[in-house]
Structures are given as structure tokens and as C-alpha cells.
Image: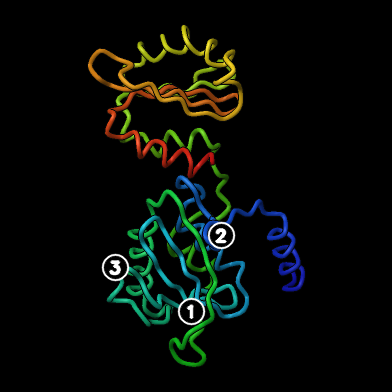
Amino acid sequence: MSDHAELAQKISALAAKDTVFEAGARVISTGGEPNPVSAILNEIDDTILERNLEIRADDAVVNLIVSGRRLRGIAGASSGADGVLGQVLSREEPEVVAAVFAVLSELCGQAQRLTARYLPPTAFGKDGERGISVKGLAELWQLDLDETPKPPMERFLRANRAAAVAMLHMRDGELQSSAGDVAALQSILDKQLAEFRASQSYGSGTQLICLEGAFSDGTAAALAIHNDDVAVIAYQPAHLGALHASWRAILG
């Protein structure tokens, strides 16, 4: 494919994106999908002119100097990047390339919400130091930039797996996944789901319904509905805030 054809393809793809903005920044990853570091590389791959790309990953911030679909280096970070700040990436210095990947993985790899904002470029490196292309970085870091994002419900369950005592996921009446003792969760599905769907307050669509004190041991339950996906999660009440936050981040 020629450079002009590839550029036209990228412009078309950008125009077709379902873009979501948050405080002036564009959301590029939610609930870990796409993979945050892959999302950053895809953002760099869409950048032709030199820019200071500000990435916010939950509470962390990292500023990358990008140009010509290449990452030149890290210009700033909220933590952990002292050893690589201001260094232009080069295949001749693999330890620096590996260190930059470690910084991005540490600051962004587990983020539930990743946003990108373009700022004017700042002085960085020397003339002629171009950095490394996105394709080159994906190869060095063993990342699949074309990985198909998982459906929203799967992303939500994965984000809350550590907080769940048990979980049960059904789609169109078929079991998709389960974890822990799901007997009580199956009972909720069998006895209460139809009532939730039939009631005016809990109609069809996308909903998260939290049931405090659902079980005698104090464990709470959440019923998550998204189109044909239904999941029931047993969790400790202390995780309620995180549950709601991830639901908003992934399913709005």
C-alpha cells in the first residue's frame, strides 16, 4: 500500500470512530479494552505532525513526544520515568526501549480509563533522532495492535474479577463463564431476573442493579444487564464504588 493510500485509510478510520470526549480529552481505552499500551501505540500511529501526546491513565499522566507515526520518547510522567525522560528511542539502545515499555505498562497497563490529548511539541532530543515506528515497537514489545476488543460485559467482568466472591455470565440463555460457588447466583437468575426485566424500573437495555445484603453472610449481589448479556456477581460491600466506577467507564 502506498503512503498516500495508507494515509487516506487512516483519515477515513478516524472519521468513522465513535469518539468520546472527557474534559477535552479523547477516551481511547475503557475497562482495559483495547489494551492500554496498544491503544497508545494506535494513537501514535494516527499522528503525523510532531506533537506532545498527553496520556491520562486514571490518576497517572505521561507525556510522549510523537511524530511521523513514531514514538520519539517520554517527555514527562507523574512517576517512575526518571531513567528514560528526554531519551530518544533507538533500536541501538534496547535497554531504553524496554524501560519505556515498563513505564507505560506500570502507569497505564491496568488503567480503567485512558484519555489522549494533543499539545504543542516541546524541544526534545537532537535533529535527526526519529525514534521508533509503531510497527517496530509492537514487534519489540510483542503487542497485537489488531486484537479484537472483547464485548463490554466481558470487559466489565474481567475488571471486577478480583473483587468478586463469585460470578455467573449468561448470553441468550447460554452459560459464558462462571467463577466461585454460583448456586446462589443461579437462584437469583432463575427467580428474580424475569421480575426485574418486567418491571418499569428495571426494563431491558443496559443496567446495573446492586442488591445490598443479598446473602446471609453480608455479601452483596449485583445484577448486570447489557442487551442479551446477563451477569450476577457476589461481592463484598466495600467494592461497591469500584463496581459502579468500572460500569460507568465501560458501559456508560
Q: Residue furthest top?
A: 191
In the picture, the disc for residue 95 is none
C-alpha span from label 1 to label 2: 24 Å
The answer for how far apart the CA atoms under marks 3 and 1 are is 22 Å
| Extreme residue in the front direction | 200
Q: Which residue is mark 2?
A: 26
Percent coordinates x, y for residue 141 in the rendering = 43, 61
Is disc 2 surrounded by few (<14), some (14 to 19) or many (20+) residues within 10 Å? some
- Describe the element under mark 1 as helix, strand or loop: loop
Residue count near mark 3 (Cα–Cα under 10 Å), binned few <14, some 14–19, many ≥20: few
Q: Amino acid at mark 3?
A: Ser
- Position of residue 127 relative to residue 161, above or below, is below
* 3 vs 1, front mark: 3
Q: Secondary structure at mark 3?
A: loop
Quarter residue 220 falls in: top left
The amino acid on which the numbered mark 2 sits, given as a three-letter code, is Arg
Q: Secondary structure at mark 2?
A: strand
- Dot placed on the residue nearer the N-terminal end, 3 or 1: 3
Work out whether 26 lies above or below 232: below
* Residue type marked 1: Gly
Task: Residue lying at the far left in this picture: please name it.
Answer: 217
Of callouts 1 and 2, which one flags the residue occurring earlier in the amino acid sequence?
2
- Labelled disc at residue 131: 1
Disc number for residue 79: 3
Residues packed near mark 1 inside 10 Å, few (<14), some (14 to 19) or many (20 plus): many
Closer to us: 173 or 54 = 54
**Residue 109: x %, y % from top left:** 39, 54
Location of the N terminus by quadrant is bottom right
At 50% from the left and 18% from the top, the residue drawn is 175
Question: Which of labels 3 and 2 is toward the front?
Answer: 2
Instruction: Report x, y in % for residue 208.
Output: 48, 29
